[in-house]
Amino acid sequence: MTGADTVARAGATPDQPQPFAELGLTRDEYDTITRALGRRPTSAELALYSVMWSEHCSYKSSKVHLRQFAAKAPPSAALLAGIGHNAGVVDIGQGYAVTFKIESHNHPSYVEPHQGAATGVGGIVRDILAMGARPVAVMDALRFGPADAPDTGRVLPGVVSGISFYGNCLGLPNIGGELDFDPSYAGNPLVNALCVGVMRHDELQVAAATGPGNKVILFGSTTGPDGVGGASVLASATFGDAGESAKRPSVQVGDPFTEKLLVECCLELFAGGLVTGIQDLGAAGVACATTELAAAGTGGMRVRLDQVPLRDASLGPPEILMSESQERMMAVVEPGRVEEFLAVCAKWDVRAAVIGEVTDTGRLVMTWHGETVVDIPPASAADGPVYQRPFARPAAQDVLAADDPAALPRPADGAGLRADLLALVGSPGLADKSWVTDQYDRYVRGNTVLAMPEDAGLVRVDEATELGIALATDGNGRYGRLDPYQGTQLALAEAYRNVAATGARPLAVTNCLNFGSPEDPAVMWQFAEAVRGLADGCAALGVPVTGGNVSFYNQTGTTAIHPTPVVGVLGVHDDVRRRVGVGFPAGPASLIVLGRTGAEFGGSAWAHVRHGHLGGRPPVPDLEAERRLAGLLVAAAADGLLAAAHDLSDGGLAVALAESCLRGGVGCTVRLPPGDDPFTALFSESAGRCLVAVRPGAEADFGRLRDEHGVPGQAIGIVGGDSLAVDGWFTIPLAELAAAHTRTLPALFGPVLSD
Amino acid sequence: MRIGVVTFPGSLDDRDAARAVRLAGAEPVSLWHGDRDLRGVDAVILPGGFSYGDYLRCGAIARFAPVMSELVPAARSGLPVLGICNGFQILCEAHLLPGALTRNAGLKFVTRDVPLRVENARTAWTRAYAGGEQIVVPLKSGEGAYAADPATLAGLEASGRVVIRYAGDNPNGSAGAIAGVSNAEGTVVGLMPHPEHAVDPLTGPSADGLGFFASVIASAVAA
């Protein structure tokens, strides 16, 4: 006898009280489990169901909405594997497939910024690896509270050092992302990590335990008490004032060196055809991997939990099942290949243990030193409950919409416009991000063609053919707050436009949906609107959603964060040598603003920075116009007509001009069309616009192409000189612009240089 | 010409070093940390990365890898060896080069395109450059501050063994702004910046780094 709570004992003690509520399960959920099993669950089973049915793992509140992504998906020949896999897979041609996904690690990063962010990178990399792909790059989208808040000084440096530590040591270039600040994220930072991987079409792996008699192998790190209960308790609990300590167990700790070995080991295992099925271990660890592999495969699995290699010998079945120890994978291997499998693991110094086998019993059975502690139908745990949470548009939404920024005082002369531009480029959300990005390795693997602060990251996939992939993530919580439907479409449109601006053709979409509590009908309304907006937007743009992640409970007390859907768009670049960057060229070029500009200031950077104002309506997305604009940008890049392109978004044309000047180290002279209101021209955030610098001599060709694609454009000046000049209004020397842009983050978070 | 590139567990820039060798016109040969075998190569590169996770101390464990038991005597007998970043740290730990690499003065990992001055263009790995030539190559490291005792530093300066120096800001607090040093013979060179990431303007700030690899090929021809 081990003293474990066995199935036999559970049958004999039906009335024994169990701590389901402490594990995050409701009475109804507990009763459902009892009915499914025909008896009370054992402690191990209770642990397993509690993590599998957590919001984080089960998507129980979001599932009914997320179905729209598949239902409304536009026809796409590029999709090889869609939602439901670890990550979607996209055909980029030449026999290559790409898989990419973005995932949140918000709560752990607040509790322990360094390790929380580090393991966020590690987790998403294993997702990509489990698809059979070699991870080739990472990105991260970050949101923090006010830049000058003391707690931001604790959280931000830790998050950045965690991403730097893990990603750099793993050897993955960090090619972009986002950094923004808003009081709504104080106490709820957002740390969304994206990974992209590349494989050949025939290298796609499946996450299913098929073939009775096949062995189940757990490999990678040993299992310890890291983050036990994290999935259900940590990721799904609101940070309130009461009972914090009870709900904040230790965050898992990352070991990127082991992950690097695991990556190389897995890729060699895949290449040797030694793997029948594979799953990464993330939230809910062994519980999730065994349940999902079994549910997706033949249906049965026998596991000996006492065979799991432990780093803490005192762990029992519930802890082993719930442990979120990092750097672990689970593989299904034919018995005849086990020896070869273990030899590859040994070569890479990766620990591996056969812990079970596939059966055709339809039951997931786990034993602990000979006694049965789990005996369940795996689908009952894998499928989880589905909730139709009530949602309702809050009345306060009308008050917010009525608070139009048109009432805000605007700069009346050149000096005022100049001051506003300098304030914007020096504001924490728009300031130079080198303080952060200099801590990331963007060069490793030698294929990074574009990285931050470019509009999108661009990575070469094939050195012989110059095929590449571009990626951008975007999200704007202010727009989301004003209108979650349009705000989400604006995020999608911006990422789509950013990818196209480099010359890459947008192909597919991933998303990380960061929201408050789904139990609040107002938040649930924001969520429902965001999902509907994204699904409709993807249909309009012709790019399918291939996967994503939902993060709920981002709130302190009853105050939720701004609804912040972060949208990632992947594009393919047929020839990375033809990439277009944001920096103005050293030689002459003429500047054109593509798209239409209206007076759209709701949720704008100008209203936020100059007035601390959030109200009115966000810009109106026009997805047909976005599609035409992207078509033009891709065609113009392929024809080599553009010397630079920069999407217009936060801060409008003025900020885009400043960024392109500083990136290229060259100035420009802008002549605003007579009659145009300079404030609107410079600071409006109308969507569907892009600033391009057309190569000398290419103006006529570009004009024809622009007409063909039906994109309006306005010539606004030329590149050259050493200042940003807006004729008749103001001039800012580049040195002054650079100083305003670069000093902000070092002033807030400390100098970088040693001297 | 065949140039070996060693892969330790945790090596990251091994493929990049091999690519640079190929672009410079030589044949890259993969060497495995666990093999006591240099496969008859004409030169060896210890690439960047985090060998053995940089646990204990950067390069401290790699120094004891089986391949090093072949490499150290070969290097002492004149085999050209280039250590880049983690490779430089390993060469110092193996006592093939003097001094040590310590935590950056700013206490943060630094990725930056840095201007460098080639102080000694007579080593096996720098003779394709002109003495005093300025180049731009990425630096990316957390423990890149070169340190040595005053006598060693004075000796290195006096004997021309400071091969590469930071020409702009000192990005990590290295003594004497030293970015790379050599052994007395000029056959073993270690440097913190990554020339393998500056072999093509498409993927790096310049192609200035190619010279390191071209140099050793020229050295072999000259010999």
Image (spheres, coloured by chain):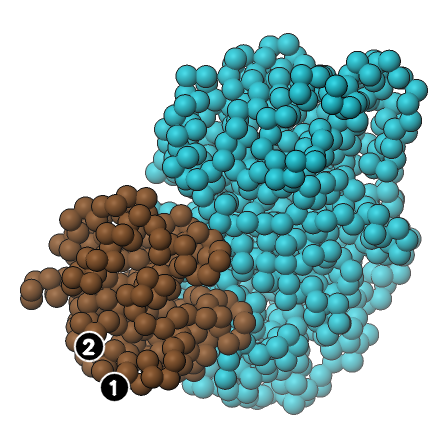
Chain colours: A cyan, B brown
Q: SS for tag 1?
A: helix
Identify which residue, A43 or A573, lies in the foreground.
Answer: A43
Q: Quadrant of residue A94?
A: top left
Q: Mark 1 or mark 2: which comes first in sequence?
A: 2
Asked if the residues shown at circle 1 and circle 2 are in contact, with their CB atoms under 8 angstroms apart, the answer is no
CA neighbours of label 2 inside 10 A, class few (<14), some (14 to 19), many (20+) = many
The quadrant where residue A71 appears = top right
Q: How crowded is mark 1: few (under 14 residues within 10 Å), some or many (20 or more)?
A: few
Disc 2 chain ID: B
- The residue singled out by tag 2 in the image is B121
The extreme front residue here reads A1
Q: In this orientation, does residue B207 appear?
A: no
Q: Is residue B131 above or below residue A448?
A: below
- Residue that label 1 marks: B158
The answer to whether residue A149 is seen in the rendering is yes
- Which chain is home to disc 1? B
Give the residue displayed 39% in from the left and 32% down from the top: A344
Q: How far apart are marks 1 and 2 (CA)?
A: 15 Å
Look at 30% across and 57% down and name the residue there: B46
In the image, taking residue A221 as reference, residue B139 lies left or right, namely left
User: Is residue B1 depicted above or below A92 in this figure?
Assistant: below
Tag count: 2
In the image, what residue type sits under mark 1?
Ala
Q: Inspect the image, locate mark 2, and give the three-letter code of the amino acid beneath it.
A: Ala
Q: Is mark 2 on a helix, strand or loop?
A: loop
Residue lying at 67% horizontally and 44% vertically, measured from the top left: A226
Residue plotted at (78% across, 60% down):
A187
Residue B158 picture location, percent across and down: 25, 86
